[in-house]
Amino acid sequence: MAATALAKTVPLAYQARITHVSKSYGRQLVLDDINLQVEPGQFVTLLGASGCGKSTLLNLVAGLDRPTAGSIETPHGRPALMFQEHALFPWLTAGKNIELVLRLGGWDRAARRQEAERLLDLVRLKGAYGKRVHELSGGMRQRVALARALAQDCRLLLMDEPFAALDAITRDVLHEELTRIWQQTGISILFVTHNVREAIRLAQRVVLLSSRPGRVVREWQVDIPQPRRIEDPGVAGLSTEITEVLRDEIRRHGQH
Amino acid sequence: MASTESKGRTQAHDLARLEAGLDALESPQRRRTPARDVLLRKVLPPLLAVALVLAGWQLLVWLRVTSDYKLPPPSATWDSFRQLWLRGELLDVIWTSVSRGLSGFLLALAIGTPLGLVVARVWFVRAAIRPILAGLQSLPSVAWVPAAVLWLGLNDSMMYAVILLGAVPSIANGLIAGIEQIPPLYFRAGQTIGATGLRSMRHIVLPAALPSYVAGLKQGWAFSWRSLMAAEIIASSPDLGLGLGQLLENGRNNADMPGVFLGIMLILVVGIAIDLLVFSPVERHILRGRGLLIDAGPRS
């Protein structure tokens, strides 16, 4: 709870503050009284089974949808959002996909090119500038998508199961890549996943949501030093503990 | 301390190399088809088909299945072609029709595009005229000719009216279908990067709908050309000049079967040529850029 103390001393020292947020679609309550704060530079994963509304919550934070009750503050502007599908535009090259974001952000032409090259270099895709989306592998597409999200130059990055569709080897590499970029840029990340080990591998804080409606069940601090690996004993140990709680949550839905 | 730092650097280096290896292994491989293969797979089969048709035609003439008057030999048709060329009329006739067809098509483009946009984006307009637009596509445009003649008289505007009624629905429908098929993910992605309203139209909607739009243009051209030929055949007047349709109609009036054959073939060849020279390259370029084009050829 050191985080709360920090928030008190420095005003607006958070990248996102979710206060008593509920969301319902018609009569169905999807999210119930969610409270969550993402501190500057913090990596938080939202973990939950299907139907816990984690993607809904991310959409709310991204401003794509409005909460039914409660408030969401993102004081440093609109956060960037990355999806499970790369969502790159197939009619543009990798570089132009990034430049479109910059263009909409009001950058001038010459600076756009330079910045796009820099971001591609950051995700280690130097030389992919002129490549079309279909010429890239799944992992490369997600890295271009990450570069495109970073082009928004915001302090908060929302990620909606961005590695779920990748093979295990590629996913491992992208975990390392994301950790490196997170440390290098100092941005905050709110990362949604249903994969317990992935959540622990990446985050400083793991927040577990229950399903139908989504509520915050429990939260864990992950103190294993980075760079971690998904097969580290510490990761496995915590994963057993969290999985047990998650399974209990899921079991509750089987009792009628 | 120094050793941890260098260890960290080695790890980073290892990761970079691992990643480069994965990228190399998993990137789709591109192969270029050699020119000889293109010739063998793309040019040879249609040439062979044409040769077969000509041979079959000649065979039917030799077998005397019907009188020469009804089925002239290929050589007679070739003679008509040469005479038309020697009289210096061939290019004029083709140009009269092609220029009419193309300017009618451009006009249809200028009307069909905004119409398609409005129908796709404004729900009330869509509900009101989408079914009518779809229905108009199945109405043969030749059905408009009598009405157009009565309204506008025997002149070029009548021709354009018939072309427009044939092509505008195709072009508008292509664009509407293209917009309806845009994956919702593109809109969400666009919204998160700040492409809303007109910017969304310019940067997301139009480029995403382009392949279907171009398919609509292609069909629009085919409809323009058909409608024009129908109009030229039915409505002939000295004021209208000699186009391909009139050439065909003159052949019928003079009971000149080689001339009729020549007319049919010229109409076909011009239609194919415009498609091959203008629309197909544009379409292939767009589809290839998006990785949507699978090259035809023998499958292994």
Image (cartoon, coloured by chain):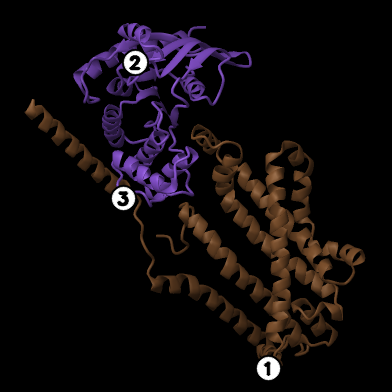
Look at the picture and state if B257 lies above or below B160: below
Visual hue assigned to chain A? purple
Tag 3: residue type? Gly
Q: Which chain is indicated by disc 2?
A: A
Dot 1: element: helix
Q: Residue at x 47, y 27 (%)?
A: A78
Look at the picture and state if B55 lies above or below B153: below
**Whether label 2 touches label 1, CB < 8 Å:** no
Counting from the top left corner in percent of width and height, residue B40 is at 44, 73
Q: Are marks 3 and 2 on the same chain?
A: yes
Among numbered discs 3 and 2, the one appearing first in the sequence: 3
Tag 1: residue type? Leu
Q: Are marks 2 and 1 on the same chain?
A: no
Tag of residue A189:
none
Q: Are marks 1 and 3 on the same chain?
A: no
Residue A254 versus residue B103: which sits nearer the camera? B103
Q: Residue at x 58, y 45 (%)?
A: B202
Counting from the top left corner in percent of width and height, residue A227 is at 21, 26
Using residue B300 as the reference point, say whether residue B49 is left or right of it: right
Determine which residue is flagged by label 2.
Answer: A206
Q: Which chain is indicated by disc 3?
A: A
Visual hue assigned to chain B? brown
Instruction: Please indicate, yes or no, whether residue B63 appears anywhere in the rendered image.
Output: no
Tag of residue B86:
1
| Quarter of the image where the N terminus of chain A is located | top left
Determine which residue is flagged by label 3.
Answer: A127
Q: CA distance from mark 1 to mark 3?
A: 58 Å
Counting from the top left corner in percent of width and height, residue A13 is at 38, 15
